[in-house]
Amino acid sequence: MLAVNLGQVIRKIRIEKGLKSNFVANQIGVTPSAISKYESGERKIPSDKLPGFAVALGVPIDLFFEKNIGDTPTISA
């Protein structure tokens, strides 16, 4: 269940911060297409990419592991 919601949580944070998927992709070393697939749940996010997502999004990594996407706090840019 976590893998399904993780991409949605990352997408929500990215959009709230006003970041483009191209920026995040460049920061973590993947293609923008991979970001789209991660966020849509089409592809699982490799665990070794999570620290890169946290850095690129400027959030603590534990924010990705909230129970529900609705539980994630609004992030200020």
Image (spheres, helix red, strand yellow):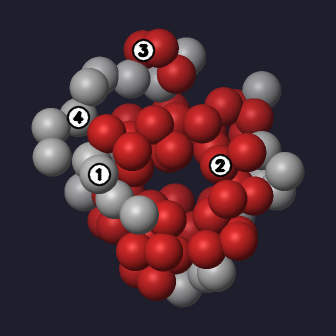
Q: Is residue 48 above or below residue 5?
A: below
Question: What is the crowding at mark 4: few (fewer than 14 residues within 10 Å), some, or many (at least 20)?
Answer: some
| Label drawn at residue 18 | 1
| Foreground label between 4 and 1 | 1
Element on which disc 1 rests: loop
Residue 39 on image: x %, y %? 65, 49
Element on which disc 3 rests: helix
> Which of marks 3 and 1 precedes in the sequence?
1
Q: Is residue 33 left or right of residue 49?
A: right
Q: Quadrant of the N terminus?
A: top right
The answer to which image quadrant residue 45 occupies is bottom right
Residue 56 seen from this side? yes
Residue depicted at x 67% and y 59%: 36
Residue depicted at x 52% and y 22%: 69
Residue depicted at x 73% and y 45%: 40
Element on which disc 2 rests: helix
> Which of marks 3 and 2 precedes in the sequence?
2
Give the amino acid at mark 1.
Gly
> Which of marks 4 and 2 precedes in the sequence?
2
Residue 60 on image: x %, y %? 29, 47
User: Mark 2 to mark 4: distance in Å?
Assistant: 18 Å
| Label drawn at residue 71 | 3
Please name the residue that numbered disc 4 is placed on: 75
Residue depicted at x 77% and y 44%: 41
Give the amino acid at mark 3.
Asp
| Foreground label between 4 and 3 | 4
User: Mark 4 to mark 1: distance in Å?
Assistant: 10 Å
> Which of marks 1 and 4 precedes in the sequence?
1
Please name the residue that numbered disc 2 is placed on: 39
Give yes or no for contact between labels 4 and 1 (Cβ–Cβ under 8 Å).
no
